[in-house]
Image (cartoon, helix red, strand yellow):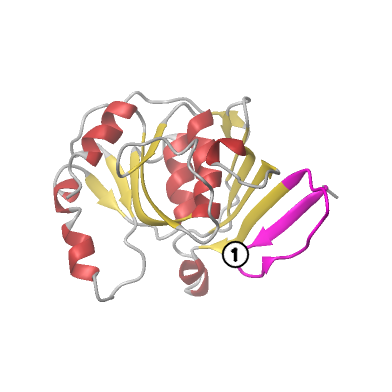
Amino acid sequence: GLNAIYTSEEAGKINDLPNPEYAVFWDEVDGTFNWQKGGLIPSAAVIAAFEYKDVLRFKDVIFAGILDLKVGDLWHAQNGSGCFFNDNKVFSNGKTQLGEDVYLVIDHGPCPSRDSRANVERFLDVYASTWPHNISCAGIHLAGVASGHFDAAVLPIQKAHELCAGYLLIREADRYIADFHGLDLGNQEFDFNKLYEIVAADTKELGERILGKIR
């Protein structure tokens, strides 16, 4: 019922309006392969909404929700109102140091590929400095950092519509998210067709230490 233009990962742009108030993006099943294999590893539905502008930027996202399709856990955030996990407001744990107690998720995307070896070698120092995992569901990766279930996440081929949802969750949780150059995403243009290189972490200090390990 919103005066919005809707865009889905699976269906693309669904409608058009002369004077939309919002732009809404979603992925019906993030972690499709996990879902197809029976759901032992989580998959998620991801949605985000912007106040409509001709050029959208990540700072314009006003609402985000990520729903774990396996167990029903829900993360949501509204601009200026905080981030919530199952209706409980989340807070930063304050972790700043690397080590075996840093629970990190790193998503290389589909393998094998022509550049698989090079893509893995970029992160060897990250692997050696943390306790790495991969759930292969970007929404859960980013939401997990926001809620403190993960201490950090490295996402070198991140889709924009999942990223904008994670960006708001992490920002509202007072955690850290930046590109591989250490630049904040806020003023960067949201491009539905672009892949982004992202580090998210419990604190800026931890995020910058991880960035320093990427080759």
What kind of secondary structure does the magenta stretch mostly adopt?
A: loop
In the image, residue 159 above or below residue 111: above
Tell me if residue 21 is in the magenta stretch: yes
Residue 214 lies left or right of residue 151; in this view the side is: left
Along the line of sight, which residue is nearer the eye, 20 or 104?
20
Q: Which residue is drawn at 44% across and 43% down?
A: 144
Can you tell which quarter of the image residue 76 is in?
Answer: top right
User: Residue 2: percent from the left, percent from the top?
Assistant: 82, 47
The percent position of residue 103, horizontal first and vertical second, equals: 29, 42
Q: Which residue lies under the disc numbered 1?
A: 9
Q: Nearer the viewer, residue 11 or 15?
A: 15
* Residue depicted at 46% across the width and 26% down the height: 174
Query: Residue 202 appears at what percent x and percent y?
Result: 36, 32
Q: Give yes or no for residue 197 being in the magenta stretch.
A: no
Residue 61 in the image: above or below residue 159: above
**Left or right: where 93 falls relative to 37:** left
Q: Give, as a single range, the part of the protein colored magenta.
A: 3-22
| Residue 93 in the figure: left or right of residue 128 | right
Percent across and percent down for residue 4 are: 78, 50
User: In the shown orientation, is residue 74 left or right of residue 126?
Assistant: right
Hey, what amino acid is under mark 1?
Answer: Glu
Residue 53 or residue 121, whichever sits in front: 53
* Residue at image coords 64%, 54%: 25
